[in-house]
Image (cartoon, rainbow, N blue to C red):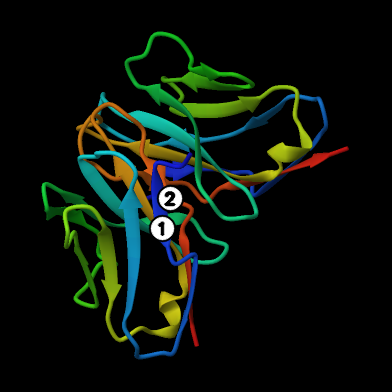
Amino acid sequence: EPEVTQTPSHQVTQMGQEVILRCVPISNHLYFYWYRQILGQKVEFLVSFYNNEISEKSEIFDDQFSVERPDGSNFTLKIRSTKLEDSAMYFCALGQLNQPQHFGDGTRLSIL
Amino acid sequence: AQKITQTQPGMFVQEKEAVTLDCTYDTSDPSYGLFWYKQPSSGEMIFLIYQGSYDQQNATEGRYSLNFQKARKSANLVISASQLGDSAMYFCAMREPPVSGNTPLVFGKGTRLSVIA
């Protein structure tokens, strides 16, 4: 059974629209991460979240992006005013001390 | 500069044979962690194996083993007795200090492994 569930599995959105990607951990974790994988390319770090606040973010994670944990369980990534180049697979990953990060199955985002 | 280098974009291996996927890394920190993930065509990222920089022995997990050569900064993945289901992309990743904490993973570009019957 996966440790984390991501919804939706596939999202198709018109350019300029906002999208919210969700990550639901099965058990308690301390650290949350979002990664992005553009088709055919390597996995890139976007942002990490610890203790209900951002702990680190990459240069990709600009003002277009935001993360939150609104209800203490779900972990969301919001992308405002989507662009064609936002099309990618988005992975949520969870971590605990001294443990490897476990990835969700990903959300495939397609911007038209 | 690339922190993780995977020089083999694609590899072929005969079923039941062993295969080595190369990974070299670049860090000046003495404490780090190295990971391998498998990504099948369905897209999910599956954790395979972990090697800590201070681990005395090479990591093993079933048919997966890690050939860790610290002086060469290499962490090659060895898959023994390849199966058709091993066909996938394989990513090497590194985590720099604090290894036990919150630092994100840095990934290589991956190697696509194709197992031939």
Please give the name of the residue rendered at 64% of the width and 21% of the height, measured from the top-left corner: B63
Location of residue A80 in the rendering, given as x and y in whole percent from the top left corner: 27, 81
In the displayed structure, A103 sits above or below A44; it is above
Please give the name of the residue rendered at 25% of the width and 65% of the height, measured from the top-left corner: A59
Location of residue B42 in the rendering, given as x and y in whole percent from the top left corner: 62, 55
Q: Quadrant of residue B15?
A: top right
- Whether residue B3 can be seen here: no
In the displayed structure, B112 sits above or below B84; it is below
Circle 2 chain: A
Please give the name of the residue rendered at 46% of the width and 58% of the height, measured from the top-left corner: A106
Residue beneath disc 2: A104
Q: Is residue A72 left or right of residue B99?
A: left
Location of residue B84 in the rendering, given as x and y in whole percent from the top left corner: 78, 38
Name the secondary structure under disc 1: strand
Location of residue B50 in the rendering, given as x and y in whole percent from the top left corner: 43, 26
Are circles 2 and 1 on residues that touch, CB within 8 Å? Answer: yes
Q: What count of labels does the image hold?
A: 2
What residue type is disc 2 on? Gly
Q: Which labelled disc corresponds to residue A6? A: 1
Q: Is residue A94 left or right of residue A57?
A: right
Q: Are marks 2 and 1 on the same chain?
A: yes
In the displayed structure, A12 sits above or below A96; it is below
